[in-house]
Structure formats: C-alpha cells, structure tokens
Image: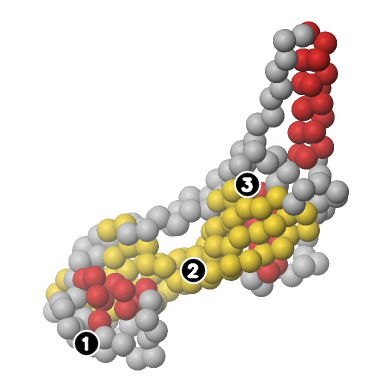
C-alpha cells in the first residue's frame, strides 16, 4: 500500500494589537494637558515605522490538525467515507506586550517570512495569505478521496506551523516584545495501518495519525 500525501501551498497570519493610554486629574487644565500628552505618545508609538525585528525561539514543525477513524477498504478505487475529526486548529496571530501600541502585525509577519525563507528580503510582495490577519484555518472537509489499493486506511491532515518570539526596536523608544504564530503549508495524507512507514521521524503527522487511529502495535504506528 502506498502512502499518499498532497501539499497545498499556503502562507498566512492574524494579529491582535492591544493598548491603552489614560490620564486623570481633579483639575480641568492638567487633565486636558495629560490627555493631550497621552494621545501624542500613542500617536508617536503607532506611527513609528521601519524599525528592527530581532527573532528568538523560532519553532517550525509539522502539526497534525485532523484524523479520521480507520476504515477497511476491500476494492481498488473505493472512496473514503470517514470524516476527519479536528485535533488542532491552526491560528494566525501576532501579539505585542500588553499596553504597547508600537507594533505592526503585517510588518512583523513579513519580517518572519524573510527569516524563515518564505520571501527574499528585497522582495516588496509577500503572499496575501501569510500576512492576512483574517485568514481562516484549512478546511478539513475539502472533498472526497479515493485510493488505488486495499487495506485498513487512515486519512489525516496537517500544517507546517511556525511560532517565534521577537523584540521590535524603533527610534529611541523602548523595545517592544511579542510573539507571532502562523503556518506556511497545509496538507493531507493517507496511510495503511499494516504497512510500515520508512524514514518517519518521531512527531511526524503520519506517525501521530497511525498511533491515534490504528490498532495498538500496528506496523504503521512504529518508528
């Protein structure tokens, strides 16, 4: 039984920016002055552009997002009928330290894209998916699958997820820290429980799917 896997190029991310600035006073004059100062500071923070991102703790790995129960297929060309159950919903997110308004989610994601090799540093264009803060998670129910063999089959889905921490420095202001997460590839595959998988690494989506859906001790569930 052959293992089949399909890849769909995709890249993306979503952002949450949080920040507050407030001043109070008993007197009318000082209140107005303090409020004006707070607004000016917020504006300065928000409009600080072309800063520098330094990245740390970059983690790029394949993550199982859905798996179906095993099903017995006894004829070639049969379609799989078991639906994938969701295990992990990939999210696209950029968070800046609480109270900061100095961050730009799209700029952070572009910097991360350069870091992981998804785009060249001198390339003005990044795929809309990677920097889109409204990107939806991949659809686990995206059509029917047929196979060209027989056996005990498990279908699964996965993404290549990226998570990284950063420090953003701009002008003479205090550096801002944060975290970005998203995914660059989503894909799906099928496996046969009684067919050993060659050169599979611990933590691979196919191995995780086999251990979840095949019988205990099945050849596909062993490294």
Quadrant in the picture for residue 46: top right
Q: CA distance from mark 3 to mark 1?
A: 47 Å
Q: Mark 3 against mark 1, which lies toward the viewer?
A: 3
How busy is the neighbourhood of tag 3: few (under 14 within 10 Å), some, or many (20 plus)? some
In the rendered image, is residue 206 in sight?
yes
- Where residue 6 sits: x, y (%)? 42, 74
Q: Earlier in the sequence, mark 2 or mark 1?
A: 2
Horizontal side, residue 102 vs residue 201: left or right: right
- On the image, the x and y values in percent for residue 10 come to 54, 63
Query: Cα distance, mark 2 to mark 1?
Result: 25 Å
Q: Report the disc number at residue 219.
A: 1
Crowding at label 2, few (<14), some or many (≥20) Cα neighbours within 10 Å? some
Q: CA distance from mark 2 to mark 3?
A: 25 Å
The residue wearing badge 2 is 160
Residue 82: image location, x then y, percent? 21, 63
Q: Earlier in the sequence, mark 2 or mark 3?
A: 3
Rendered view: 42 above or below 68: above
The residue that appears at 59% across and 55% down in the rendered structure is 179
- Residue located beneath label 3 in the image: 97
């Amino acid at each position: 039984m052959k293992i089949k896997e399909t890849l769909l190029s995709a890249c993306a991310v979503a952002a949450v920016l949080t920040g507050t600035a407030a001043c109070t006073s008993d007197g009318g004059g000082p209140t107005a002055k303090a409020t004006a100062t707070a607004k000016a500071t917020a504006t300065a923070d928000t409009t600080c552009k072309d800063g520098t991102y330094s990245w740390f703790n970059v983690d790029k790995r394949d993550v199982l997002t859905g798996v179906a129960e095993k099903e017995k297929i006894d004829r070639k060309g049969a379609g799989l009928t078991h639906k994938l159950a969701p295990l992990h919903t990939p999210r696209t997110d950029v968070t800046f330290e609480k109270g900061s308004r100095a961050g730009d989610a799209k700029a952070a994601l572009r910097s991360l894209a350069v870091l992981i090799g998804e785009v060249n540093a001198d390339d003005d264009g990044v795929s809309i998916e990677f920097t889109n803060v409204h990107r939806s998670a991949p659809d686990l129910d995206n059509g029917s699958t047929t196979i060209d063999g027989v056996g005990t089959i498990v279908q699964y889905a996965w993404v290549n997820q990226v998570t990284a921490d950063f420090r953003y420095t701009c002008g003479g202001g205090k550096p801002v820290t944060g975290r970005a997460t998203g995914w660059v590839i989503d894909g799906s595959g099928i496996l046969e429980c009684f067919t050993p998988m060659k050169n599979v690494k611990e933590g691979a989506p196919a191995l995780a799917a086999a251990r979840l859906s095949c019988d205990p001790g099945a050849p596909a569930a062993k490294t």
